Image: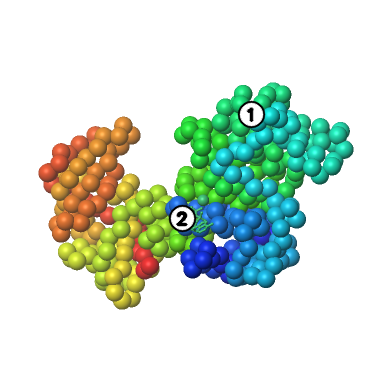
């Protein structure tokens, strides 16, 4: 039995259903990321877990005990959980020490115990030197670390984070991802982490749950989700990709409307109707001349635009029927717009998507 279980969970706001039947099992000590575009129901799911909003259907169980169902909701203060929001919500009139100690004072712990636990968590979050400062005297990253320290110090059963890094600038955000993962490795709290940023999810998560329109689209390790997307939505959302549509040729081949046959070494070709192939920008090969002896998965194309990006060139090329494909090429492969090139879609990098 997993520590945190969501079972057929639904949430309606009036006639609008924001969460449409979510099943999820989180093992004790794991960090799970809910990843998806704005409005897909991530925050609502987190608030359901925290007990801030009641469920309309299904259940949430912690350690096998029901905490939310359509009939009853255990209030947030009776769930041993900490939630961290986008805004750090620190007390401006309290020092770093005071902010972190606050939750323990509410719980009426003895003063020496409070001092010991706060000192320990300030050391772990590298804030010891700043204990006497006020939030107004801290950088954004330092304030975010204080909010993490404050959440961790009460030793929650479950830690909930809602886009905790979205107010930080890009460099700091990247650094804090590693920091969150490091703290997780140290404290091993069962954590649900909400983000719309795929790199953030890939850096921090044991399990990534991709959400779309109130539902779970796919759940798996970062590698699973990136290497083996099951749907067009997941392939596009994680890492970006080209989706080429066609019809079934055979069990592992999709034939495009212009006749180009794409052999796919992974995925599933739909039996009937339209089916798709996903091939990522950096997996496509461009060349000036037709690749020798290779007939399959190869087509002529025209360069539409080309951008120099330092580490590579970002091409947009147009196939015979006007369909465009994005492909990355080495910087020394420089072909101007209007020129013809050959595009090769390596079968081992082509993934068939039935959905
Ligand atoms: P996310 O966090 O993934 O961006 P949310 O869970 O905040 O998405 O919202 C999911 C959907 O539910 C959105 O369409 C949003 O407009 C709607 N929604 C969220 N909160 C409320 C509310 N209190 N009342 C009505 N609709 C809401
Ligand atoms: Mg949100």
- The residue depicted at 60 percent of the width and 38 percent of the height is 88
Residue located farthest toward the front when viewing the structure as drawn: 14
Q: What x and y, as percent, mark residue 18?
A: 50, 62
How many angstroms separate mark 2 from mark 1 (CA)? 31 Å
Q: Relative to the observer, which residue lies in front, 99 or 184?
A: 99
- Is 145 above or below relative to 296? above
Q: What x and y, as percent, mark residue 135?
A: 63, 29
> Image quadrant of residue 97?
top right
Q: What x and y, as percent, mark residue 189?
A: 69, 48
- Ranked by sequence position, the earlier of labels 2 and 1 is 2
Mark 1 crowdedness (10 Å alpha carbons): few <14, some 14-19, many ≥20: many
Horizontal side of 307 relative to 96 (left or right) equals left
Q: Relative to the observer, which residue lies in front, 298 or 12?
A: 12
Mark 2 crowdedness (10 Å alpha carbons): few <14, some 14-19, many ≥20: some
Q: Is mark 2 within 8 Å of ligand 1?
A: yes
- The residue depicted at 69 percent of the width and 42 percent of the height is 151
- The reply to whether the C-beta atoms of the residues labelled 2 and 1 are less than 8 Å apart is no
Where is mark 2, residue-wise? 39
> Image quadrant of residue 308?
top left
Residue 252 can be seen in this image: yes
Q: Relative to the observer, which residue lies in front, 57 or 287?
A: 57
Where is mark 1, residue-wise? 135
Which quadrant holds the C terminus?
bottom left
């Amino acid at each position: 039995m997993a520590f945190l279980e969501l079972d057929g969970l639904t949430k309606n706001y009036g006639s609008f259903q924001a969460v449409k039947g979510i099943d999820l099992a989180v093992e004790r000590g794991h960090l799970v990321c809910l990843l998806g575009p704005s409005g897909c129901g991530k925050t609502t799911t987190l608030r359901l877990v925290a007990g801030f909003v009641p469920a309309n259907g299904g259940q949430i169980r912690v350690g096998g005990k029901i905490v939310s169902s359509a009939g009853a909701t255990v209030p947030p203060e009776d769930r041993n959980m900490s939630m961290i929001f986008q805004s750090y919500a620190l007390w401006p009139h309290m020092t770093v020490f005071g902010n972190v100690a606050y939750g323990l004072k509410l719980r009426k712990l003895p003063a020496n115990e409070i001092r010991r636990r706060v000192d320990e968590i300030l050391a772990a979050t590298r804030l010891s030197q700043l204990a006497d400062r006020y939030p107004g005297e801290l950088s954004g990253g330092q304030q975010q670390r204080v909010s993490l320290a404050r959440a961790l110090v009460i030793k929650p059963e479950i830690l909930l984070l809602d886009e905790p890094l979205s107010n930080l600038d890009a460099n700091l955000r990247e650094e804090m991802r590693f920091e969150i993962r490091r703290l997780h490795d140290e404290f091993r709290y069962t954590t649900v982490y909400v983000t719309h940023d795929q790199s953030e999810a890939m850096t921090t998560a044991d399990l990534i749950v991709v959400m779309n329109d109130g539902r779970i689209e796919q759940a798996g390790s970062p590698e699973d989700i990136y290497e083996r997307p099951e749907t067009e939505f997941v392939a596009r959302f994680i890492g970006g990709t080209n989706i080429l549509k066609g019809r079934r040729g055979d069990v592992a081949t999709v034939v495009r409307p212009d006749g180009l046959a794409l052999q796919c070494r992974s995925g599933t070709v739909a039996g009937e109707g339209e089916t798709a192939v996903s091939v990522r920008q950096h997996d496509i090969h461009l060349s000036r001349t037709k690749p020798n002896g290779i007939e399959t998965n190869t087509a002529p194309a025209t360069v539409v635009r080309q951008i120099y990006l330092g580490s590579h060139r970002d091409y947009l090329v147009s196939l015979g029927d006007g369909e465009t494909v994005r492909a990355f090429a080495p910087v020394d492969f420089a072909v101007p717009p209007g020129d013809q090139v050959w595009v090769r879609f390596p079968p081992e990098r082509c993934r068939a998507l039935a959905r």
